[in-house]
Image (tube, rainbow, N blue to C red):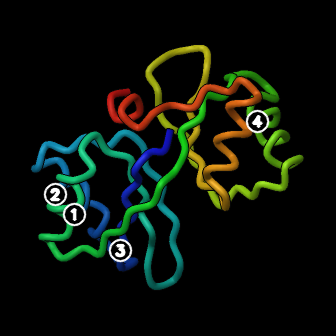
Amino acid sequence: MKVEQISVFLENKAGRLAEVTRVLGEAGVNIRALSLADTTDFGILRLIVDNYVLARDVLKAKGFTVGKTEVVAIEVPDRPGGLASVLDILAKAGINVEYMYAFVQHSGKNAVIIFRFDNLDEAIALLQQAGIHIYKGEEVYKL
């Protein structure tokens, strides 16, 4: 139920993001979802890709600092209050959302949101008990 996410640390200067996407594109790696957070000096690019191992290897070979984090991809009703209903379940159990970002999907009745929790295993169990669909990594990489 966990998804492998790549975290790439980038200097906050022109062209670094373009370089990452070019390197991945040339290697045939497809980006499925991404999030970019920045500070004055550096940024953290978080990526879900269709081939984690290849992406990690080609980025490291080009000198990028790359880390791996496990996240959860959750199906959320695509309607007003849909996300709130999922977050309420987690809040009542005292589970903290460290960060989240949307996964682009071509069509459908539900949205897919990527979450990082302070307690992944507890969050997964709680959401499953609530009947919320959690994607397997293999499903996410193919979306």
Q: Amino acid at mark 2?
A: Val
| Contact between labelled residues 1 and 2, with CB atoms less than 8 Å apart | yes
Residue at horizontal 17 percent and vertical 62 percent from the top: 57
Q: Amino acid at mark 4?
A: Val
- Tell me: residue 62, above or below residue 24: below
For badge 3, the amino acid type reads Leu
Describe the element under mark 1 as helix, strand or loop: helix
| Label annotation for residue 19 | 1
Q: Quadrant of residue 20?
A: bottom left
Vertical position of residue 143 compared to residue 39: above or below: above
Query: Which residue position is annotated with label 3?
Result: 10
Residue at coordinates 16% horizontally, 57% vertically from top-left?
23
Return the x and y of residue 143 as percentages of the image width and height. 38, 27
Q: CA distance from mark 4 to mark 2?
A: 36 Å
Could you tell me residue 2's position as x and y percent?
48, 44
Q: Residue 98: percent from the left, percent from the top?
A: 66, 61
**In front: label 3 or label 4:** 4
Disc 2 crowd, CA 10 A, few/some/many (<14, 14-19, 20+): some
